[in-house]
Image (tube, grey):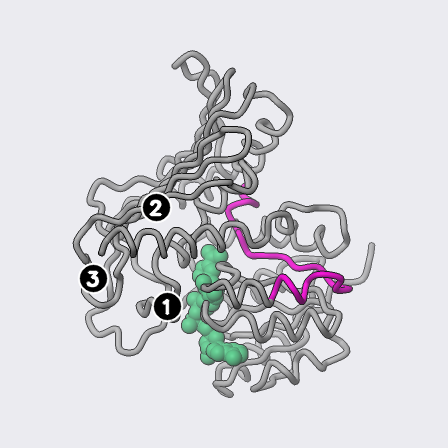
Amino acid sequence: MSSPIRVGVVGAGFFGTMIASACAGHDSFDVVAVADPVADASQRLAEAHSARAYVSFTELVDDDTVDLVVVATPNHLHAEPAVAALLAGKHVFVEKPLGIDEDSVGSILAAARGARGRLIVGHVMRSFPGVRRMVAQARRGDLGEIIEAAGARRRVVHLPDDPGDWWKLDRRRSGGELLHEIHELDLVVWALGEPSEVLSMTGAPLAHGEHMVDSDIVTELRTPSGALGRHSVSTSAHRAEWWFRISGTEASVEADFRAGTVTRYEDGLIAEVTGVFDLPASDESLRESAETAQSYNTGGPGPLWMRTAVACELDEVAAAVRGTSTTLTEHPATAALVAIRANTLAAEAAR
Ligand SMILES: NC(=O)c1ccc[n+]([C@@H]2O[C@H](COP(=O)([O-])OP(=O)(O)OC[C@H]3O[C@@H](n4cnc5c(N)ncnc54)[C@H](O)[C@@H]3O)[C@@H](O)[C@H]2O)c1
C-alpha cells in the first residue's frame, strides 16, 4: 500500500473539522498541519489530530511535510491559500465554490496551469455513488443522446435570530445562494460540459432582507450540442425540492435526494430504482435531513449522510492525487464561472 497523503487543513471551522475527521478515518490520509488565524481554533483541531498548528496559511504552505492542502476558508478567501499552495507544488483541494468572482477563479486556474500538484474542487455531490452511476450511464450512451440535465435545490432556509456578522449570510463574502449552494448547478455542467449560452433570472421578493438578495434564481444553459441545462435554487420554497436529472433520447435518470433514490425512467415508466448512497442508513439520513427546513451549518459532526458523502469524496481525492480519477478535477471552474455569470444576469434582470 502507498504511504498516506499528508494533509494540511487551512480553515479550522465547520467543514475543515469535518474533512479532518474524515481524513482520520480514511487509510489514505494523515492530517499533519492546520492553519487558522483564530489561534484557538487552529490549536484545537491540530491537537485532535496530533498535527502542527499555524495561524497563517503561508506557514502551512511552507511546511515540507504537507502533500495536500485543503482550503476550507470562507468562500471569498479561497484564492490566496490555493494559489500559494499550487505555486509551492502541493496538491490542492479547494472547497466549493472555487471562487466568487472571475478574478479569484482566474488566479487559481492560472496557478494550476503547469503546476506540479493537482487542483481538486470539493464538488462533493459528484462523489455520491448514485450520481456517479447516472453520469457514467450518460457517458456510456445508456441514455441515448443527451437532451437535458437539470437540478434543483428549493427549500425554506431559516436564519439564526441574531446572525451577527456571519460570512455565510453576506453575499459579498459567500457569493450569494447560487454560488454557496452550487452543488446541483455543478452536476448539470459536469454532465453536460461547457455551456455556450447562459440565461438567468431572479423574480422573488427578498426572503431574508439584506442577507440573501437572490432568494429565488433560475438558470438555463445551452451546450454546443444543443443539450439544455436547467437549474433552480430557492431559500423560500415551502414546497421543497432537491433533485438532479439527466435525460436522453432512450431514458431519463433522476436522483431525488429527498427520497434517497435514483430512478431510471423509460417511456414514462419506472425501469429501475436504486439508492443515492447504496447504504440504507445513509439514504435514510438523507431523507430525514430533507424533511426539515434548512439552516446554514455552524458546527458539530454533521448528519450521517454528509459524513458518508465526505468519505466517498475522500476516495476520489486520494485517486485524484494518485492520478487515477478525474471525478473532482474535470471542469474545476465551469460551475463557479456559470454561477458568477448567472448572478450578474439575474441582478440585471431584477433591475
Ligand atoms: N461541500 C460541502 O457540502 C460544504 C459544507 C459546508 C461548507 N463548505 C465550504 O467549506 C468552506 C468553509 O465553510 P465552513 O462552514 O467551515 O465555515 P466556517 O466559518 O465554519 O469556517 C471557516 C474557517 O476559516 C477560518 N479562516 C478565515 N480566514 C482564514 C485564512 N485566511 N486562513 C485560514 N483560515 C481562515 C475561520 O477562522 C474559520 O475557522 C466554505 O468554502 C464552504 O462553502 C462546503
Residue 126 lies in the magenta-colored region: yes
* Label 2 to label 1: alpha-carbon separation: 30 Å
Q: Between disc 1 and disc 3, whose residue precedes?
A: 3
The region drawn magenta spans 108-128
Instruction: Look at label 2 and name its amino acid.
Output: Ser
Residue 200: mark? 2
Above or below 287: residue 169: below
Mark 1 vs ligand 1: CB below 8 Å: yes
Return the residue at label 3: 208
Q: Residue at x 58, y 80 (%)?
A: 35
Residue pictured at 40% horizontal, 13% vertical = 269
Which sits in the foreground, 231 or 265?
231
Q: CA distance from mark 1 to mark 3?
A: 18 Å
Disc on the earlier residue, 3 or 2:
2
Quarter location, residue 65:
bottom right
Report how far apart the C-alphas of labels 3 and 2 lie in the structure.
20 Å
Relative to the observer, which residue lies in front, 340 or 26? 340
**Looking at the picture, how far across and down is residue 332, in whole percent?**
59, 53
Tell me the SS state at disc 2: strand
* Mark 1 residue type: Thr
Look at the numbered disc 2 and say if its residue's Cβ is closer than 8 Å to ligand 1: no
Q: Residue sitting at 71 percent across and 72 percent down? A: 87
| Disc 3 element | loop
Mark 2 or 1, closer to the camera? 2
Residue 14 sits in quarter:
bottom left
Does the CB distance between marks 3 and 2 fall below 8 Å?
Answer: no
Residue indicated by mark 1 = 298
Query: Looking at numbered disc 3 in the image, what kind of residue is underneath it?
Result: His
Judging from the image, what secondary structure is the residue with disc 1 in?
Answer: loop
Q: Please identify the residue farthest to the right as the structure is shown.
A: 1
